[in-house]
Image (tube, grey):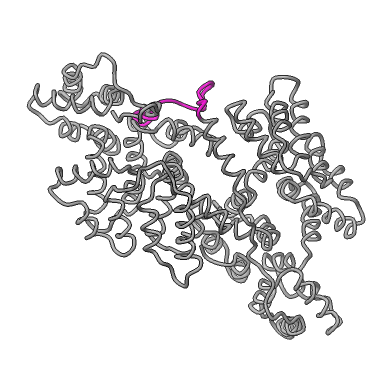
Amino acid sequence: MAKPAQGAKYRGSIRDFPDFNPSQDAETLYNAMKGFGSDKEAILELITSRSNRQRQEICQNYKSLYGKDLIADLKYELTGKFERLIVGLMRPPAYADAKEIKDAISGIGTDEKCLIEILASRTNEQIHQLVAAYKDAYERDLEADITGDTSGHFRKMLVVLLQGTREEDDVVSEDLVQQDVQDLYEAGELKWGTDEAQFIYILGNRSKQHLRLVFDEYLKTTGKPIEASIRGELSGDFEKLMLAVVKCIRSTAEYFAERLFKAMKGLGTRDNTLIRIMVSRSELDMLDIREIFRTKYEKSLYSMIKNDTSGEYKKTLLKLCGGDDDAAGQFFPEAAQVAYQMWELSAVARVELKGTVRPAGDFNPDADAKALRKAMKGLGTDEDTIIDIIAHRSNAQRQQIRQTFKSHFGRDLMADLKSELSGDLARLILGLMMPPAHYDAKQLKKAMEGAGTDEKALIEILATRTNAEIQAINKAYKEDYHKSLEDALSSDTSGHFKRILISLATGNREEGGEDRERAREDAQEIADTTSGDKSSLETRFMMILCTRSYPHLRRVFQEFVKMTNYDVEHTIKKEMSGDVRDVFVAIVQSVKNKPLFFADKLYKSMKGAGTDEKTLTRIMVSRSEIDLLNIRREFIEKYDKSLHQAIEGDTSGHFLKALLAICGGED
């Protein structure tokens, strides 16, 4: 069993079995496989309740008692995923890694994801043991085999990692941190082309502690996280490897939580990944992985495995998981610390918000107005020209074009576009032509028109706009519809949901920084879910979530985790329902990370059968000059595909072309 560092708590889910008797265990396994069929339940119960060290003793005793190889017998008796999982548990960790890598580079094609996962995440000592185990098991040199099966910068970085020579000194030189930040910046962002060697040298050799400080300083210096620079400067498997290294430097447990989530989400399960991680981390950091999984994905690892697998395979995985963090009293105290650290990071990160649509250089409203008139004159419409002009001008420039169009031709550009275009493209182009506050006002009006109310649209707009934006929307709504927004909301919604929306629609959120003492009081106010009725709880949440500043609310959420062991979002989902729950969750997600909130909305608008074109259009139009570039980064980070790819796969024709122009690039 892997020893925890001196003074550190053991964080594996599998421990040494007390009163261990290897001869008795060998006999139990022999009897379970004797005769016709095998007792799979007995096999999995025994193997998952022994540590790896104890399993090796059982193997030796089995051979002494019966003259047979236990692993060979298990392979013969078991099949499929269950066999792979049990046999994986029976190998010493370094030999299990060696087998995974051998399989990854054998035959046609290479499993680069497996190579990346193992070599990016293992410690120096684990790498040295892996190299020795590979040599012993296959009588081959691991470096030579990997070199022969990979190429380019990807191969170079793998070779660096294979040396197992990452610095391990916890004493960090501030001067060297600054130098590395400068070297990385100059090797990527400031250079025509990229100096990959600098990225390889620094990320492949510096200590974890040092690199964490480098990443923090890089963000402060450049205004973007190191991951964004890696995505912009590197590509292919090399880019994926470097991103994995960065994730493991930040938090190995979070890296594996994410890998496990992705292995099980969506259609089909990536069983090889699931088996490899559950086996390799069961005696290292499974408890940490579970905590982060629960905090990050709001469901336990246990429940996801339970819903995604079956049979003895499922039972074995659940034994390795070691507990259900959704069960009452099971959510670890340490999880609070994990979430708290996440908030600490988000509180210091000041990422610059950037749109994708910027003012056009050499702007000529006269030429643009004439080109648009020509594109709509006569038979047929030149949609390409319309898209090219409107999607590449800022909103302020589009207003100038409207004015110039009217002065030149005595015609209303909006009316002409409406008569020439149709469907999704018309909605998108006309949306881009409207001033932002008037566009939002129109979306709110449409959400309340006719039979039924589009609560999702109301929530999305009112929960995410700044005070200045809300005040401008109020003014535009009154101007365009001769009725106050508050009156419209009052007549179209009801109960607590109405009160929350009206509170948000005042645009009166505090704008100062955080007040720690008050944050603790606010956290206590909403943490007490037992006093008063549901209505009282909703009122308390409303008074705090709808009025406090974003920086202050981040601190409230942090204090809330400290007090309750739960993320505030989890409590809202548990204690509330319907539109009230949805609006509070939207506020919390917006406070935590607004670009990620919109990235999630965009993903949901395009996943599954059919596309929610209204949501897709509304977000692309409204965020194009604010933070769409940040939304793109969050999208690829969370969903492993770019927003550009998602749009390409889900839309078509001129609508697709216009959306891609606004998207502003492929990540």
2 on left or right of 521: left
71 on left or right of 521: left
Q: Quadrant of residue 419?
A: bottom right
* Looking at the image, residue 29 lies above or below residue 567: above
* Looking at the image, residue 376 lies above or below residue 40: below
| Residue 613 seen | no
The foreground one among 63 and 256 is 256
Q: Magenta residues?
A: 315-334
Q: Quadrant of residue 48?
A: top left
* Looking at the image, residue 4 lies above or below residue 192: above
Q: Percent position (x, y) of residue 19?
A: 25, 13
* Looking at the image, residue 128 lies above or below residue 217: above
Name, please, the residue furthest toward the right.
482
Q: Percent position (x, y) of residue 480?
A: 88, 60
257 part of magenta stretch:
no
The foreground one among 517 and 353 is 517
Quadrant location, the N terminus: top left
Name, please, the residue furthest toward the top.
19
Q: Residue at x 50, y 26 (%)?
A: 332
Q: Percent position (x, y) of residue 539?
A: 78, 30
Q: Residue at x 46, y 26 (%)?
A: 324
Q: Residue at x 56, y 61 (%)?
A: 647
327 part of magenta stretch:
yes
The foreground one among 254 and 661 is 254
| Residue 623 seen | yes
Q: Percent position (x, y) of residue 554?
A: 66, 40
Name, please, the residue furthest toward the left.
67
Q: How many marks?
A: 0
Q: Quadrant of residue 504?
A: top right
379 on left or right of 473: left
